[in-house]
Amino acid sequence: MHSSSATKSERPSQYTMRRMAEEVQPINEQSSWILSWLPSWCPTSLSQLKDAEEKMLKCVKCPFSRQHVRISSGNYLWTLAFPTQPQPQGRPRPPLVLLHGFGGGVALWAQNLDSLSSGRLVYAVDLLGFGRSSRPQFSTDPEGAEEQFLAALEEWREKVGLEEMLLLGHNLGGYLSAAYTLKYPHRVKHLLLVEPWGFPARPENPNHSTIPVWIRAMGAFMSPFNPLAGLRLAGPLGPMLVQMIRSDFKQKYSSVFDDNTVSDYIYHLNAQTPSGETAFKNMTIPYGWAKRPMLERIGQIRADIPISFIYGSRSSIDSDSGYAIKKTRPDVEITVIRGAGHYVFADQPDDFNQAILRILAKTQTQKSGDEGSESEERAEKVGSLKQSELPCSEE
């Protein structure tokens, strides 16, 4: 792996990594007796997930470090840290933190990490309950489950030693990024929402006639189960099931992999004991609507925090939420990537990377301009004060 060959100068700065917990072996988490048979039925393990992730990350060229960052209650968040390359003298740029979506993991950013880290420190984090992070029991209350996600992210920030960050989230990661910004506004310099889930409320009178009867029947039958229960119930057929149902992922990463590397990774991500998946289920109502829609809350985000939306032109997630927010916050930026679906960062990685870098560069320029204007205003105030303090001349 690239991290083993990285020199000391290539690693993240002492400031950003001094408080990061040392890498440890994952703790064997307890699961209910109902799930105790999963390891023998499903051809997966934490070791296989690790191997699948490392295979995904072989296409990443720049050096990086990997850590289990310890938080409270014996939990940890699996983290990749990409050191910044030399940059011009001046105030350090805030790091970019990437949060994946439902059922995802850090390695799905494999086609983006080299480009996005070419100017600033980048962290990719497995959300609590997903990937190689801890899989604790979540509250059955939607607000309580959301709070567990946010508390874990805030503890992670403290442990890593970040004062502020640029927060980018996809899907569920976008929803949680917005929720985090609401609760900890002084920690977020820019909120970037990539195809965010959970923004609009479910229509009061949904048109069930547009939903096929068999889908409604299946939804009612599966409602007591977690969203990906079928994957685990498939047992030895699980890997093949992923290859069939999500064959599109092979195409998304075809420029770097020509085998089942991606589908294997997705399988091992989601064949483990469900945790974050259960939390997500408790945060939703049929069919995939959020119990606590973000569109009803995001207007409370501090006005001076830039918000950017990134959508795919071919996505099933419409951009109405982004434009609705823009009506009340004209400075909101909306970018639509042509030819991309919901996984815009994988469908059109080059266009996505350039769009993110452009947005961040624009923010940096505006920030520098604002700081310059503030300095001029302070100078004018000081000059005015000094002038008023001069003794009046006698006529």
Image: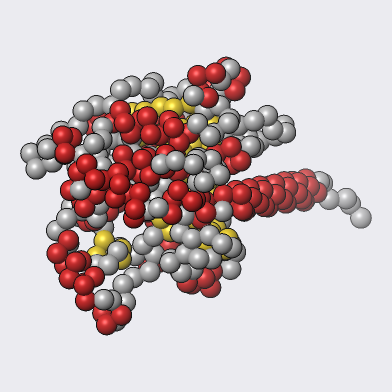
Q: Position of residue 278 (x, y in %)?
A: 22, 50
| Residue under the image location 61 percent in, 41 percent down | 115
Identify which residue, 212 or 177, lies in the foreground. Answer: 212
Give the number of marks: 0
* The residue positioned farthest toward the right in the image shown: 395
Q: In this view, does 342 lie to the left or right of 353?
A: left
Q: Position of residue 205 (x, y in %)?
A: 27, 81
Identify which residue, 271 or 95, lies in the foreground. Answer: 271
Q: Can residue 126 be seen in this view?
A: yes
Q: Where is residue 170 in the image (x, y as percent from the top left)?
A: 44, 52
Q: Is residue 289 left or right of residue 21?
A: left
| Residue under the image location 50 percent in, 19 percent down | 4
- Above-or-below relation of 110 to 28: below
Q: In this view, does 134 lie to the left or right of 119?
A: left
- Above-or-below relation of 38 to 302: above
Identify which residue, 233 or 372, lies in the foreground. Answer: 233
- Above-or-below relation of 365 to 164: below
| Residue under the image location 31 percent in, 77 percent down | 203
| Residue under the image location 53 percent in, 66 percent down | 313
Which quadrant is the C terminus positioned in? bottom right
Identify which residue, 238 or 170, lies in the foreground. Answer: 238
